[in-house]
Amino acid sequence: MKFSKFFFGTDYYPEHWPEERWSEDAKLMKAAGFNIVRLAEFAWAKIETREGHFNFDWLDRAIDILAELDIQIVLGTPTASPPPWLMAKDGELFIVKENGVRLGYGNRREYCPNHPLYHQHTERIVTQMAERYKDHPAVIGWQIDNEFGARCFCDICRGEFHKWLQTRYANLDEVNEKWGTIFWGHVYGEWSQIPVPVQLGYHPMDSSPNPGLALDYFRFMSDVYVTYQDLQMNILREKCPKHFITHNFMGFKYKNLNYFDLAKNLDFVSWDNYARMQWTMDADVDPSNAALNHDAMRGLKKQNFWVMEQQSGPGGWEHVAAATKPGELRLWAYQGIAHGADGIIFFRWRTCRFGTEQYWHGVLNHHGIPGRRYEEIARMGAEISLIGEQINGAVMKPAVAIMQSYDARFAFQIQQVNPKLHYEQQIGDIYKAFHTQNIGVDIVSEKDRLSGYKLVIVPLMYVLSEETITNLERFAEKGGMVVLTGLTGVKNLHNAVVNMKLPGLAAKMSGIEVEEYLSLPEYEENEIKFSHVTLDGNYPVPIWADVLSLQQGQPIGHYSKDFIADQPAASLNEFGKGKVLYLGALGNYEYYKDIAQWLVNLAGIESPIAAPDGVEVTVRWKGNRRLLFILNHTQQEHNIHLENSYSNVLNGEIIHETVGIPPFGVLILSD
Ligand code: GLA
Ligand code: ZN
């Protein structure tokens, strides 16, 4: 989706403050350069005060005050947090958690996404809001619900799961066969006998459900939220054809929903970006985390995105997180833009005095008087009003893709395989290996077209389908370079182990077979020693070691410890016009970094300019115009050496050879 301008604004809760304050807020927002505000996503109880009694007057007045200053509005449908009167109607409206316990009232996201009564009330509130605001000139779009998630394991969901299964399997015999229910004699004779994977084992070790059933339940619950989102979307599309529709996603780390599916019908993806979270109390922010999140969110639709909630101060529920240092808020917001954001909305406007999030700091402190954070964001607002048009809609064109798979992510939640193995951490380390070299990366799905890339990394493709392998083979045949890792091709689509030598379907393109694998225990590591001319060195192998037998290609690394010493750990194969690297050993960031450096050279990929450690560089293209974003994530000033002259987009100056970048500073250059 293309927008007429760059959007810059804040998430605002006028319902938390006396009405006399609203116009002061609007004036301060305007002065900060804000042109958009998100409203109402938790305001159901204030809009529908009793069943069927709607009060929009307050919201009308809040919108009008903002609209008068040319601030536009995204409305949230308020279904993430239902009013008490609704939840009091039926105890079964509450979600049953994975441990079998039913939630009660008092938080949010407590509703069962399959409950018919919840659907009825959802339809009513969404219809009412859509009717009310469909023609309001200031309202331009909708955010559906808020951060979908929370899997439910109740009886209603169980019934819906049975129906879902019946649309995917010809009959029960097929289910029994694919899941292997003969194990422990679970052969189902009626659909209604099929359980949901609640943790009901007698002993914690007994809680592990049938892997085939559990994977289908993940897919089912993901589909449930897509369907629930569609229910709202259909109403909004019909009533408000001029408005955009989005949802605020939770970045790369969230792993319970298939985000590619959730993104599909939306106009664009938006997401909530908190670089320094209250619960980590972590003063050092690794910029590659947010970068991965941005790239993963851009990857959901291969399209620019918005940050619907951008950190505006220290987070905090029970603790107050470390302060955001001067320059960090602006830097983190620009980092989103550097990765393809066409809208940045700060969460939240003013720090709330009450409620669970009274320490989640906004642009303003509790007292409402502008201070350091407001000034910093307002400075950025002034910059955006100058340069917004130049950056809006500019696209990224990375040469490297990392493939992520929700099937694999679901399956690894069912069986972790090794207690030290974390899929998200592995992807994070591999991503960081490219990010620290300032090599742009797209995060793609198994189904995406790969033809534009030079290098595609496919980590831990644990559940592997014929389609995925065909996609990868085609890419390699035409000259692409593919990297596969240990724990690839282990499972079929029903989460059963394949009846082949590993890496199963990937054996052909990689030219190897896995003779055996070692899952490394807490107290033991192996080691890989590379022996390729341009890649050498030893690296620890702490988690997993595939021992390879080469059918084709050349070994480029061997294990050096224990009984697998001297056996092949990594290989490079020619496939069609391309190359396939198989890394049998899983490792950590340092390992992936050196491999990435080697691969980038091999594939002829270059970083846009040389930059010191901690200085991030990305490229966006507006037509033929190249925009370089240079972000200093360190607390030191740095000099950047340039080979050509550039214009500094933020102040119009021409820069030759060297330019200084202050601590937490941002430069935008164009050639
Ligand atoms: C999420 C939610 C917000 C708020 C923030 C801060 O991103 O969408 O409503 O709760 O976290 O906790
Ligand atoms: Zn349910």
Image (cartoon, helix red, strand yellow):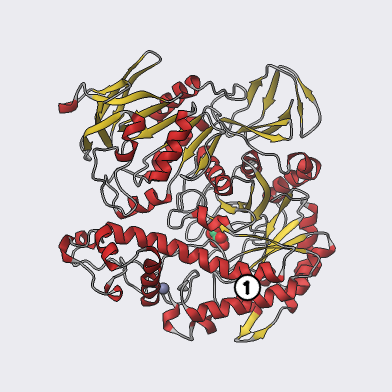
| Residue 45 can be seen in this image | no
Q: Is residue 468 above or below residue 615?
A: below
Residue 24 percent coordinates (x, y)? 79, 63
Q: Is mark 1 within 8 Å of ligand 1?
A: no
Nearer to us in this view, 326 or 439: 439
Residue visible at 21% across and 21% down in the picture: 566
Residue 637 percent coordinates (x, y)? 63, 27
Please identify the quarter of the rendering in which residue 646 is found. Answer: top right
Identified by mark 1, the residue type is Ala
**Quadrant hosting ligand 1:** bottom right
Q: Residue furthest top?
A: 533
Residue visible at 61% across and 34% down in the picture: 397
Q: Is residue 140 above or below residue 447?
A: below
Count of residue discs: 1
Q: Is residue 185 left or right of residue 62?
A: left
Residue 396 percent coordinates (x, y)? 63, 37
| Residue 28 can be seen in this image | yes
Q: Is residue 555 above or below residue 15?
A: above
Is the residue marked by circle 1 packed among few (<14), some (14-19), or many (20+) residues within 10 Å? many
Residue visible at 41% across and 31% down in the picture: 483
Q: Is residue 545 left or right of residue 463?
A: left
Nearer to us in this view, 615 or 195: 195
Q: Which residue carries the number 1 mark?
A: 43
Q: Is residue 314 left or right of residue 30?
A: left
